[in-house]
Amino acid sequence: MIIPKANKLDTSQLKEIEAIAADFECSILEIQGRNRCVYAILGDEGREVMFKRIAGLPYIAKVDMIESPYKLMDRRSGLSDHRVRVGQIEVGKDKPFIIAGPCTIDPANPNFYIESAHALKEAGVDALRGGVWKPRTNPYSFQGDNHSLSIILQAREETGLPIDIEVMDSTQLKLALEAKVDVVQVGTRNAQNYCLLKEIGQLTAGSSTAVLLKRGRHMASPNEFIASAEYLVAEGNPNVMLCPRGTTPPLDGYRNHPDESITPLLKNRTWAPVVVDPSHSVGHADFVPACSLASIAYGADGLCIESHIQPAKGIGDDPKQAILPQKVKELVVACNEVWKNRYLP
Ligand code: PEP
Ligand code: MN
């Protein structure tokens, strides 16, 4: 990781460093943070001579060799002071960052989505979620609909809130980026789809688009999760939020095995904000508030909660796990209280 003295290398400086790196079969990747650029060495960065030549250049402040499987996501990397913003908000700054909305947008009943969005704005959330395309276990279940994209765009227009949608392939990604969605969500099933992660990283590099990366439900270690995020950052987009959402096998009675407890581990290893999804974790509306509060106590920067004005009339996961916007409103207040009183190392 190369950190220049100025905010950015000029073209001739970058060329000089690229030439040194090329002598050692390495290349350089520019990563645009909010305030400055850092440069990753791709390839075997442990080549001592290369390291010394770059470190010796007069315009270089520091070259860090990070002994970590994930060089850019590491808390000690040059991105350690990077802050993720969604719309106008810096995630995890003064209060929990709350994303909420229905699991799945029902294109046949757009008013459910629009009214849920208004109620959630009133509840004080920071961003809206809503499934346009859905990863369904059963191929005969509703798979989503392109028309739902226009519904969530209308909700953004009317509420002024940023929006988060999941994409599963290149076509959906391109449609989402054309629509300038604020947060691209990678679901649990694609958390290790490295081709998709790379493509998202490439197409959002240098932009303000954030990525909400869910934890793979079969992922073993937190490091596997962080390594997936590294794919996005290594392609040039450091605006990554890590989203624990429960793993499998489930804890008897819950939809998954709740994993908000990995939050302190993630915070200890990386600089990326952690936004827990309590809804998929426990999978039942009654348990979502406790899981939300626990997540904030564990040090989470935010939450992604499924909420619907009439859960029983929703589709996808909504009848089971969506909570009412009024509950979200109460939770926002309660989470703020936990946030103020929590003990973090
Ligand atoms: C969702 O957010 O509705 C969803 C499908 O999430 P996950 O990928 O965590 O199952
Ligand atoms: Mn869902």
Image (cartoon, grey):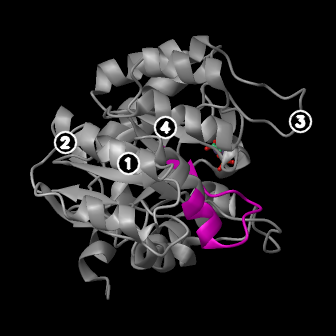
Name above or below for residue 2 compared with residue 345: above
Is disc 2 placed on a helix, strand or loop?
helix
Q: Which residue is mark 2?
A: 13
Is disc 1 placed on a helix, strand or loop?
loop
Residue 142 x %, y %: 78, 25
Residue at x 40% of width, y 70% of height: 48
Q: Which residue is mark 3?
A: 138
Residue at x 27% of width, y 37% of height: 15
Q: Earlier in the sequence, mark 2 or mark 3?
A: 2
State yes or no: discs 2 and 1 in contact (Cβ < 8 Å). Answer: no
Task: Report how far apart the C-alphas of labels 2 and 1 lie in the structure.
Answer: 23 Å
State yes or no: discs 4 and 1 in contact (Cβ < 8 Å). Answer: no
Classify residue 178 as left or right of residue 6.
right
| Front in this rendered view, residue 155 or 237 | 237
Mark 3 sits near ligand 1, with its Cβ under 8 Å away: no
Q: In front: mark 4 or mark 3?
A: 4
Q: Earlier in the sequence, mark 1 or mark 3?
A: 3
Q: Is residue 139 magenta?
A: no
Residue type, numbered disc 1: Pro
Q: Quadrant of ligand 1?
A: top right
Q: Earlier in the sequence, mark 2 or mark 1?
A: 2
- Quadrant for the C terminus in the image: bottom left
Is disc 3 placed on a helix, strand or loop?
loop
Classify residue 16 as left or right of residue 193.
left
Q: In front: mark 2 or mark 1?
A: 2
Q: Which residues are magenta?
A: 212-227
Residue type, numbered disc 2: Gln
Residue 244 x %, y %: 57, 62
Residue 96 x %, y %: 32, 61
Q: Characterize the local packing of mark 4: few (<14), some (14-19) or many (20 or more) Cα atoms within 10 angstroms.
A: many
Quarter assignment of residue 55: bottom left
